[in-house]
Amino acid sequence: MNKIARRKFMQLSAAAAAGYFMQPSREALASELPHLTLDDLMAQAMKYTHDASTVDPATRNNPATDQDCANCDLIQGIEGDAWRPCQIFPGKAVAAGGWCSVWQPKA
Ligand code: SF4
């Protein structure tokens, strides 16, 4: 990650964290959350896609092979749901089969 990308990531992460902690009930209305769109500026900054299979593994920061939102440590909501909340995108639902550059293995 170059210097500008890192700075942008830190700015967006701070904004995401602020939104995350300000949400009164982030789990309650998961099924009613609007879906994250590909034209969302933060989604673009994080290289989000609805389909993890379209991502070239060589472009990932993390070398783990099996990566999608459903097996990311930052996903929330109910296992098996097609669209779920994510800590990085407060107020939006991400596709379980999606992916972004912040993907982290579950602890
Ligand atoms: Fe998906 Fe994880 Fe990125 Fe959220 S942080 S969009 S769950 S890969």
Image (spheres, rainbow, N blue to C red):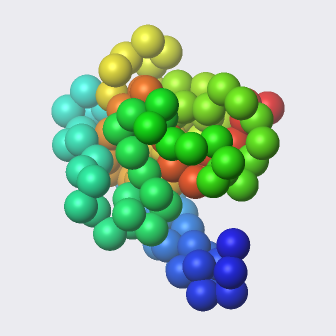
Dividing the image into 4 quarters, which one contains the N terminus?
Answer: bottom right
Q: Is residue 63 visible?
A: yes
Residue at position x 38%, y 59% from top? 43
Which of 50/53 is in front? 53
Which of 25/16 is in front? 16
Q: Is residue 22 visible?
A: no
Based on the displayed image, in which of its 4 quarters is residue 68 positioned? top right
Vertical relation: 103 (above or below) 30: below
Residue 80 position in % (x across, y down): 44, 12
Based on the displayed image, in which of its 4 quarters is residue 8 positioned? bottom right
Residue 59 position in % (x across, y down): 63, 53
Residue 33 position in % (x across, y down): 24, 39
Based on the displayed image, in which of its 4 quarters is residue 32 positioned? top left
Dividing the image into 4 quarters, which one contains the C terminus?
Answer: top right
Residue 88 position in % (x across, y down): 50, 54
Q: Horizontal placement of 64 versus 7: left or right?
A: right
Vertical relation: 65 (above or below) 103: above
Residue at position x 64%, y 42% from top? 57
Residue at position x 59%, y 79% from top? 5
Which of 104/18 is in front? 104
Vertical relation: 10 (above or below) 107: below
